[in-house]
Amino acid sequence: LDAVQDVDRQFRRGVITDGERYNKTVDIWTHATDETSNTMFEAMRRNRGSGKPNPLFMMVDSGARGSRKQIQQLAGMRGLMAKPSGEIIEQPIISNFRGGLSVLEYFVSTHGARKGLADTALKTADAGYLTRKLVDVAQDVIITEQDCNTLNGIEISAIGNGAKELVPMSLRLVGRTAIEDVVDPVTREVLAASGQDISEPVAERIEKCGIERVKIRSVLTCESRRGVCAKCYGRDMTNGRPVDLGTAVGIIAAQSIGEPGTQLTMRTFHIGGTASSTFQQPMVIAKNSGTVRFNDDLRSVKDMQGHSIALNKNGSLSVVDKDGRELEKHTLVLGAVISVDDGAAVKKGQVFIKWDPYSVPIIAEQEGVIEFRDFKEDVSMKVQVDAASGRKGIVILEHSDEEAHPQIAIKDSKTGRALANYSIPSGAHVVVEDGSPIQPGQMLAKTPRKVSRTKDITGGLPRVAELFEARRPKDAAEISKIAGIVEFGGIQRGRRLLIVKDVATGEHEETWIPIGKHIIVFNNDYVEKGEPLTEGPVVPQEILDVCGPQALQEYLVNEIQEVYRLQGVEINDKHIEIIVRQMLRKVRITDSGDTEFLWGELADRNVFHEANRKAMGEGKRPAEAMPALLGITKASIETESFISAASFQETTRVLTEAATLGKTDPLRGFKENVIMGHLIPAGVGFPSNRAIRLVPLAQPVEEGHAEEAKQDGANRLLNLLK
């Protein structure tokens, strides 16, 4: 409460804007709810020091029933609630269900309860349909061989949010196969040999050694002609042993992703509208003792206090040991204050980087005098007077005047020459005055970060479906096609020009961005290929075109996991990887060469490689193609089996097309075999298992002899025991 009152006082004094006050308040309460929840769980775990396990704690902790959120609302505090519009109400419910709510708290709760009931009815159907689509796309993924002998794999590392580690690397490594020897960087001891299954103790040792990235085999890069191989899949999640031949891993994957979907839909119903906004941690704590090293991609300036301030997004700094080995690396946000110098020592647990999580600042790099340019009142900016404090503040407006680009120039106080120009985006609050002196590292303006909407699973299930269907998201972000330095161009017909220039090659890429869109890069920022230039979700198709299939695979797996993680549902990566593999199994022909393919045709990757091998063997020109991304519905209909496709959707179209082209169905998947009344090609019906027959190796023992043998055995055992 004191912290919230403090934030209110800052707002009344005019230090922070209303948006920042709201965001800070929501963050403080989210943090408080988490703290009470953690304290309560710790108390439940100890069970009043009785030494006996608390059954309720065991039930939730094992994941058998219920979630931490539900127990927290029963015995901790209910926390923040959401309005029907999706915004978070900033007064939380401090009571819990056991203690009972006050009349007002009960009234605020009713929003969520009503929303939950309506949601459940609508969403159960959605979750069921998603499961059906997933099963259909992945049903023919079966373990067909032990090892495909591929040399390709994927790199994995821990997943974190700021300084907080969400998923440790050891958890992602368990049950996977190493593609190359994993070596301890200090002792050079081999921790995991190439082709070895990584067990829990090995994964923990790898993490303790400070190795940040490990290359592993994955179904995404498996080169089996049909299905996937056991080495690329790794451990069977059901029994903890290496996966057997003929296991239907595709259907297991589809059900593992679809089943929580039904939970997720009900989840809103269980909890009511408790806002699940995650608390942002605006600081970096050193995990190791060592020396700080500013990397080449970091631009910084010293402020009056002698602290370094990061001037660019995605600049990084490392902590290294005495031999110069990197122990940890941190990517900084714009305006981060680094309290240690380059080359200085840090101790483990020391906070050495902090930033403001509520606003994006624009920082001065030179010393001089401020001059406002194109600040036209009520056209490009307006003066706001704070009713509480009587302070004046300038806010930049969204405007369609193509001549007015609000800028702050810094001029040399002696010569009057312009030293730097800063373009000020719309929605920014200017914190300096015209004609005032400025020092390096001082803030010129700040743009509030977006007010947080609740990430309810109503946002979740549609988001999962959107990713699996590879749809173009609403208000998608523009991404950079090349790596280089950002330059701002002029404005034409309500659109702003952004140019990314590659300094080394001189290549440049122009992007026109609508004025209303919030640009998240600044002048002279260095951007990587595929990095978003504006706010919003990224279009998967664009990632594929710009960065290639591997970047897209990583993006899809991480984005889908993010939605489930927010709801506290754990799904193993390999299940999602199987679905993503199916989405990327086709290629689009760009040049048919001397093959029978047509330009623009979708062909199965294996069929394409096979045809090319054949053409090259005959001395002909091979075809060329680019990877194609299909949504799960489209991928199901485009499958090689027309019986399976017809039993899914668009039956008449699929069957007429198959009849016209005279297709044959090889009956390799599950559905087509079930429809035809054959044994399914998995488990007992797996081709290599079908030939198994019982062969009698000796004469059957007759009844009387069997009894004698039993008695004899019993007597022997008694003698042994004596």
Image: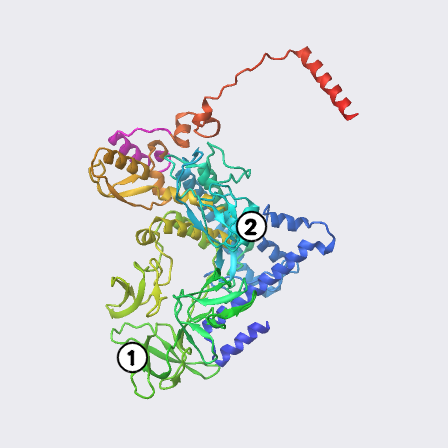
Report the amino acid beneath label 2. Answer: Glu
Q: Is residue 299 above or below residue 693?
A: below
Residue 472 horizontal/vertical position (percent): 34, 53
Q: Which residues are magenta?
A: 645-667
Q: Quadrant of the N terminus?
A: bottom right
Q: Is residue 321 visible?
A: yes
Secondary element under disc 1, as helix, strand or loop, is: loop
For the residues labelled 1 and 2, the Cα–Cα distance comes to: 58 Å
Is any part of residue 569 visible from this angle? Answer: no
Residue 204, numbered circle = 2
Q: Is residue 57 left or right of residue 544?
A: right
Q: Which mark is residue 255?
A: none
Q: Which residue is mark 1?
A: 374
Determine whether, in the image, residue 415 is placed left or right of residue 79: left
Mark 2: few, some, or many residues within 10 Å (few <14, many ≥20)?
some
The residue at 45%/21% (across/down) is 691
| Residue 254 percent coordinates (x, y) | 45, 41
Within-10-Å neighbours for mark 1: few <14, some 14–19, many 20+: some
Mark nearest the camera among 1 and 2 is: 2
Query: What's the residue at 43%, 50% (across, down)?
Result: 155
Residue 417 placement: quadrant? bottom left
Q: Nearer the viewer, residue 28 or 126?
A: 28
